[in-house]
Image (cartoon, helix red, strand yellow):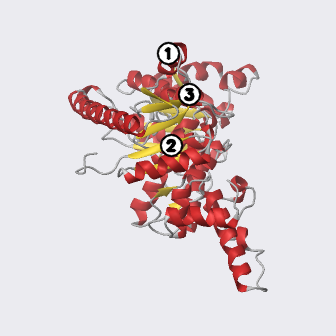
């Protein structure tokens, strides 16, 4: 191994703990760092949290087998380039072709020959390093052709479709209608459109149409003349005038009244507004981006929304997917929110453990991105600076009521000292292994003991895998 580089991290995936222990010991003796998983779901969680450099993947596992794990890896852009060496007792050409077609880079047959395995690992890491260098150079060359949308996070297929639509509409003056559930990031996308558009140096004004009474919203949008209503003590320009030359973002447009819809239609058709209490119209130059969590076409059918306004707004609709339909983006979003919080406060956790990231990825997120952001910020408050957010730092809805320290709460405190100490050790080790999904290396790091010492304790205390 090239000692000038940071040791490569290798994820071992095998449902036989003995095989995992043996491979971990042999690879660590060769100078590699190891991660371990004993089933397919645990492997995917570790991939999301740790981003290993290479995966040794057993084919035959209960539940999610090696081929299924491999297919999910190759379908995810974040893992599609991670080298995978399959470990299998299958030796037929048909079986090897099946694995290679699924995306395996190489094969090592069981029983494993150590020299062959190390040689194949070195070869795969060399190839991966060269591919990374080529990718970096290609990225630099093609940078001018690639678009980056500030503030928008995610590489899922659902988000790629959104990016494709953004590419087409950002530089135009077209009205955009953003559809999506509450918390899916509609205002973030609206701000991105403004930031990337020719109007980026002019105002961006956002107003929530569902948060104000009708008269107040009308005055807020269009302004008013002195004396137009009680409290109108002076002339006042509305948001459309304030945003002249820029962008007005009308959030929850579906909550507007029929009377206000008529006035909005005139803005879109004629580029004119009339202040409350005035007779004359004023020209404004604004681009309108509207958003709603409602089905406006159904609102039109029900007679609650003007059809002519709907067609003016829906010139270019963009559907934002709920977070449950893009779970592969959850790790990147969680890290993004954690980084934002840390940059703002100058301190905070350094990341997430695999069990915590697995719990985040498994949640359905009815509140979408906003709920995830709140969860990450809350967990960061319970986690120390420089540490990693663990599953015990997450809210009870995600952990089934687990709280830190619960695993050792019932330990007895009387009797022979050696028996009490053994019971405490058993509880601490069991709890740590649970938090780290059985990963003994990570548990040893947390308990501040050597991995060899931990393995010996596990055997001596009769702790089952």
Compare marks 1 and 3 and give the one earlier in the sequence.
3
Quadrant of residue 427 within the rendered picture: bottom right
Residue under label 3: 89
Q: Which residue is mark 2?
A: 12
Q: How many marks?
A: 3
Measuring from the top left, give residue 459's x and y in whole percent: 64, 62
The part of the image, by quadrant, that contains residue 140 is top left
CB under 8 Å between callouts 2 and 3?
no
Marker disc for residue 97: 1
350 relative to 21 in the view: left or right: left
Residue 377: name its quadrant: bottom right
Task: Label 1: state its secondary structure.
Answer: helix
> Is residue 394 in sight in this rendering?
no
Residue toward you, 330 or 3 = 3
**x, y (%) of residue 438?**
61, 53
- The residue at the far top in this view is 94
Residue in view at x 78 percent, y 74 percent: 410
Mark 3, residues whose alpha carbon is within 10 Å: few (<14), some, or many (≥20)? some
On screen, residue 411 above or below 381: below
Label 1, label 2: how far apart the Cα atoms are? 22 Å
In percent of the image, x 65 and y 43: which residue is there?
Answer: 362
Q: Nearer the viewer, mark 1 or mark 3?
A: 3
The reply, left or right, for residue 208 in relation to residue 337 is right
Nearest to the observer: residue 92 or residue 71: 92
Label 2 Cα crowd, 10 Å radius (few <14 / some 14-19 / many 20+):
many
């Amino acid at each position: 191994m090239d000692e000038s580089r940071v040791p490569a991290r290798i994820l071992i995936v095998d449902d036989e703990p003995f095989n995992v222990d043996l491979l971990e010991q042999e690879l660590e003796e060769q100078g590699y760092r190891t991660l371990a998983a004993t089933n397919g779901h645990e492997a995917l969680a570790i991939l999301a949290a740790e981003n290993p450099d290479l995966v040794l993947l057993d084919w035959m596992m209960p539940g999610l087998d090696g081929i299924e794990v491999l297919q999910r890896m190759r379908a995810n852009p974040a893992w599609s380039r991670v080298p995978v060496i399959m470990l299998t007792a299958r030796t037929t050409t048909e079986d090897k072709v099946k694995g290679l077609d699924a995306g395996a880079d190489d094969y090592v047959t069981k029983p494993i020959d150590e020299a062959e395995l190390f040689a194949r690992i070195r070869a795969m890491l060399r190839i991966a390093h060269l591919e990374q260098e080529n990718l970096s150079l290609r990225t630099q060359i093609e940078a001018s052709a690639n678009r980056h949308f500030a503030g928008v996070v995610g590489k899922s297929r659902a988000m790629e479709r959104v990016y494709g639509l953004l590419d087409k509409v950002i530089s135009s003056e077209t009205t955009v209608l953003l559809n999506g559930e509450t918390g899916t990031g509609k205002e973030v996308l609206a701000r991105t459109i403004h930031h990337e558009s020719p109007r980026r140096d002019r105002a961006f004004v956002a107003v929530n149409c569902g948060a104000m009474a009708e008269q107040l919203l009308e005055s807020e949008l269009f302004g008013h003349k002195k004396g137009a209503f009680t409290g109108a003590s002076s002339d006042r320009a509305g948001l459309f005038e304030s945003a002249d030359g820029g962008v007005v973002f009308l959030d929850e447009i579906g909550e507007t009244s029929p009377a206000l819809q008529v006035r909005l239609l005139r803005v879109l058709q004629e580029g004119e507004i009339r202040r409350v209490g005035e007779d004359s119209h004023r020209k404004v130059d604004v681009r309108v981006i509207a958003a709603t969590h409602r089905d406006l076409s159904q609102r039109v059918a029900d007679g609650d929304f003007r059809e002519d306004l709907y067609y003016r707004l829906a010139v270019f609709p963009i559907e934002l997917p709920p977070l449950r339909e893009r779970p592969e983006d959850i790790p990147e979003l969680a890290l993004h929110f954690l980084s934002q919080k840390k940059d703002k406060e100058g301190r905070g956790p350094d990341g997430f453990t695999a069990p915590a990231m697995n719990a985040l990825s498994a949640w359905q997120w009815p509140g979408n991105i906003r709920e995830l952001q709140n969860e990450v910020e809350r967990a960061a408050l319970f986690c120390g600076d420089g540490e990693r957010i663990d599953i015990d730092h997450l809210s009870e809805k995600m952990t089934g009521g687990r709280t830190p320290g619960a695993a050792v709460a019932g330990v007895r405190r009387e009797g022979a000292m050696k028996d009490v100490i053994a019971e405490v050790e058993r509880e601490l080790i069991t709890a740590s292994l649970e938090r780290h999904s059985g990963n003994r290396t990570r548990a040893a790091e947390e308990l501040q003991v050597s991995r060899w010492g931990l393995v010996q304790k596990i055997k001596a205390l009769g702790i089952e895998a």
